[in-house]
Image (cartoon, coloured by chain):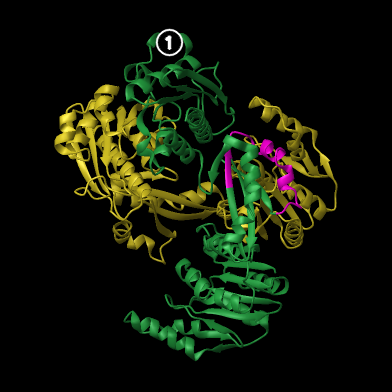
Chain colours: A green, B yellow
Amino acid sequence: MNVELLIIGSELTSGDKLDTNGQWLCRRLASLGLPVRFSTLLGDQWQDNLLAFAMAAERADLVVTSGGLGPTQDDLTRETLARVAGVELLEDPASLETIRAMFARRNREMPERNRVQALLPAGAEALFNRTGTAPGIWMQAGRARFACLPGVPSELKLMMEEQVEPRLRSLGLVNRVVLHRIINLFGLGEAEVEAKALDLTAREHTPEVGITASDATISFRIRGEGPDEATAFASTEPTAQIIRERFGVLVLGEGDVDVPHATVAALSRAGLTLATAESCTGGLIAERITTVPGASQVYRGGLVTYATDVKSSALGVPVELIARHGVVSAEVAESMAVQVRNKLGASIGLSVTGEAGPNSSSDAIPVGTVYVGLATADSVHSKLLQLGREQPRGIIQSRAAKHAMNWTRLTAILRG
Amino acid sequence: MNVELLIIGSELTSGDKLDTNGQWLCRRLASLGLPVRFSTLLGDQWQDNLLAFAMAAERADLVVTSGGLGPTQDDLTRETLARVAGVELLEDPASLETIRAMFARRNREMPERNRVQALLPAGAEALFNRTGTAPGIWMQAGRARFACLPGVPSELKLMMEEQVEPRLRSLGLVNRVVLHRIINLFGLGEAEVEAKALDLTAREHTPEVGITASDATISFRIRGEGPDEATAFASTEPTAQIIRERFGVLVLGEGDVDVPHATVAALSRAGLTLATAESCTGGLIAERITTVPGASQVYRGGLVTYATDVKSSALGVPVELIARHGVVSAEVAESMAVQVRNKLGASIGLSVTGEAGPNSSSDAIPVGTVYVGLATADSVHSKLLQLGREQPRGIIQSRAAKHAMNWTRLTAILRG
């Protein structure tokens, strides 16, 4: 079963607009057991439409298109499809009536130019659009079954669910549920994770497992399949179990659970609270922690000690300590962690001080050097991170914040 | 000149991830006078890669690809391109050295798996990647010139600008410049801005002007065109001048200049410093301010007083004041602003306290109620914002942060 999308609109190929219909259709079709092979963006040019529709008619079994059904001259889907199928365009009286009625409901007369929206290739079926003027088209052309939908996202989604999916079911094309279970880890590089999971990611492994990395969080993606959702989910469980056992505490959780969520959850389970003192991350840890629902149970607050003297005046790091070791040092990181813990009355004090760039204030300390400090009631430690002197500032800040939160998470797990 | 994109990754065709590289490349190539005809998403399947690369090699003049250059088994771009060009894959010693050096800078040994990233189709040129491990590929295959870039957005963008564009110029392919000049404002709704600019956005207006809104920042987009960048830019200047005159201090700046950048710039010009005390925004203002280059000149630091008692214990807001007026009140906002200004020794103290939701802690105070406080040496004021009780938490936080920063910006302009 070859499924393709054609996503039409010059505002997309010019980069003026971001296509989101393609993503929605990809996800929806995957969940119906009809994974998309190719999704092609193309502009409102006649030759390009002809080329793309003709190729899809030749190589795909199902083609879903978005856009090109409006009333203007650059709306070419009706004509293109008729040409590719080798048929005439005919006015569909029922569609014309529907379009007139749609305008009537808005207390307007149908403009003459909207009349073209009632044209259909001979032999096509109109797909009812209950929220807009453009009917969709359902027809065979070449080898492929075409479902042509309007580009307005809300109309496209409704019509896919209400008009296209029942037709796919009645053709017997939808009888599987496919889902992707995502398991996220933090603390190893993508290649290291891959090396520990070659058996799972091998092409012949069932279920199919992929690995992706996003901002240093590594995700396993397990494909589940079955006649219904529960069976599809169950088919992923043995693999999920292996991943959990093999990667242990590095596993953050599933789905959207990234380092901040897992950190709040670990603190919450352990009954611990957190206070933060941030220098080069400038409040990023506080910001990420406080976007997690339930953060108020575990997060006391924090200081952003951006100017060096504020580390002493507001946080209480001894001036001599900064003078002796420099502001980017293990000693200052540890002092910041201890001070913020005491000051805000938290179980754990977490601190970050480093050089996020683009320029370092000291020749001795390259950009990307970050110290993280962590204080508990009975201990204080620090860690040196080298996050790469070529990395952009935002990446260094984000990595530093994630490493710091992850250390907190692991501490909470150990102490919990 | 036929330009195509191939955007590779099963996480894209499954709909798990939204492709943004395609949009960025479409816009970038359009600005070079190289509009994209087709942009095709495809997964990490060998047959699909082969089919898509072979077709692009046959019908396009320039193909830019994203993804498939990583070290894992499903990274197929190197092999596919070699097959389509009919050549062998060879290890490139210079690329291998670069990859090893990249790991060395992070104090890590190169995992053996990453060695495959140094493979190149015979006759290809490596595109240097200074922020990641995957080198790009530049080579002729069939009719088309291929530029293969990694899927990591930051790497793709840098390499497009630094590696691909100079090569396109030296091939004489770039000879028309289209640019979009963006002018950003904050403080009026989109409809209000539109109503004041109907003459500029009319279809017959030259140059073409559009208005978009993103997170309450309103942007004018002026299209400039010419044989070179200077001429294209100059064609937008009369319109830009009208916008600046008509909207005055509401204009934040151009391009990527949003509220945080404009706030840092205004403080810097006025020679003023800032300290922040944040409750419901959880460090978001600190985080946004400190991502702006040069923030260290004007930003002293801040407190995130997330737990109520921390507002008293760490910031010094009188316990009685909180008891009398409630934590979400004008009085507490003003006290927070005064305290943080004194504590951190700044010219301006800025505070935020409010209910960001999803649930309000008090029946009397609906979600979306936010007080902003601003203290200077001789004054303290507060503002009540009603940001909508139906809005998601993230939107309320972001709007509150922007309004607070913008107030700081306007204060700095008046006092500067």
User: Which residue is at the front of the view, A399 or B174?
Assistant: A399
Q: Residue at x 33, y 24 (%)?
A: A345
Q: Is residue B393 above or below residue B416?
A: below
Read off the residue under disc 1: A321
Left or right side of B377 for B4 = right
In the displayed structure, does residue A222 sit left or right of residue B387? right
Region of the chain picked out in magenta, as a range: A183-206
Residue A71 covered by magenta stretch: no
Relative to A51, does residue A307 appear above or below in the rendering? above
Q: Is residue B409 left or right of residue A28?
A: left
Q: Label 1 sits on what residue type? A: Leu
Specify the subunit that label 1 lies on.
A
Q: Position of residue B154 (x, y in %)?
A: 57, 42
Between residues B238 and A79, which one lies in front from this camera angle?
A79
On-image quarter of the N terminus of chain A: bottom right
Residue B250, x across and y down, in percent = 30, 46
Residue A216 in view (yes/no):
no
